[in-house]
Amino acid sequence: LQIIVTVLNENDNSPVFAQPNLSRDVPEDTKVDTVIVAREELSASDADLDTIYYELSTTVQGTDGYFAIRGVNNPELYLQKALDYDKFNSTALLLYARDMPVTSPDPSNTTHTATATITITIQQSDTRAPWFLPCTQLHHDKSVCISSPYSGRVNISEMSTQPLLLEPGPIYAVDPDYTISDRIVYSIVGGNTDEVFSVDADTGNLTMKKIVTSPDSFLLQVMATQVSNTRKYSVATVQIKVINKSNFPPYFEKEVYNGMVLVGLPQRSFVYQAGDPSTPLVITALDQDFPDV
């Protein structure tokens, strides 16, 4: 009697990842659809030779949708959505490998599962041009800095040897990609008629090279450029008004002003001259430097 025995393969082994813990550094400017971890590194093996089904999830809130796998049977990890270092700079992904689909029609079959952890660290890239400070308005996602023009004054026919005092502050720019923090250099690229002004390339201090002999104002354009990436630059305007030198302080026409208000008047009501309830009280000052003002 010839007896043929067929040994059936029982599903008694779990999938196994060759590397259950992986780490990757991903630059912020990585293009969408770029492969982050190859299929060969993420594929699990199964001694039962079962088909492996994969599923990816994230453990960090707010980082869903950025990374994905190619398919249920292809664990290749790729970038699905553009990164932003200001939103998050790291995340942890869990890759599950099962020897049966999650929606297996036979509930009696035992599903074996293996898990791999993938730690992703985002590296900030040089994506933004320098910011002139202070920022009067910062975009809602803190990606754009809107600064006010700088302004200052010089006296006509007078040479100043000190850096000019400007509002709202001295010329100053920073690299907003703060983990890179590239060095900034300054230059005047427009509006500097007759080369009257110069700017210190390192500090941004604005100084005079010549006296100004006409009352015309200047509208300078100062450029801040990153040293290691000259394509990253910003331009700010600096308005310099030319005025007559002030030799005299202003003075009030009277030492004491007397006014009168009525009880019960609403806010923003006029104060009237004492003894004359029909004439608003006006306080005026004069300056000998500006007799026509």
Image (cartoon, rainbow, N blue to C red):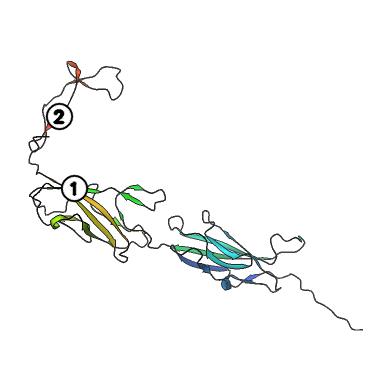
In the rendered image, which quarter is residue 235 located in?
bottom left
Q: Can residue 224 be seen in this view?
A: yes
Residue 275 appears at what percent x and percent y? 17, 15
Answer with left or right where residue 30 lies relative to residue 10.
left
Residue 102 appears at what percent x and percent y? 69, 60
Answer with left or right where residue 142 lies relative to residue 215.
right
Sequence-wise, which precedes: disc 1 or disc 2? 1
Say which element carries label 2.
loop
Q: Which mark is residue 178?
A: none
Q: Residues within 10 Å of mark 1 (few under 14, many from 20)?
A: some
- For disc 2, the marked residue is 284
Q: Residues within 10 Å of mark 2 (few under 14, many from 20)?
A: few
In the rendered image, which quarter is residue 5 located in?
bottom right
Say which element carries label 1.
strand
Q: Is residue 196 visible?
A: no
Number of numbered labels in the structure image: 2
Looking at the rendered image, the quarter that the C terminus falls into is top left
Q: Do the residues labelled 1 and 2 touch (CB within 8 Å)?
A: no
Instruction: Name the amino acid type tagged 2.
Output: Thr
Looking at the rendered image, the quarter that the N terminus falls into is bottom right
Residue 254 appears at what percent x and percent y? 11, 26
- For disc 1, the marked residue is 152
Foreground residue, 214 or 56? 214
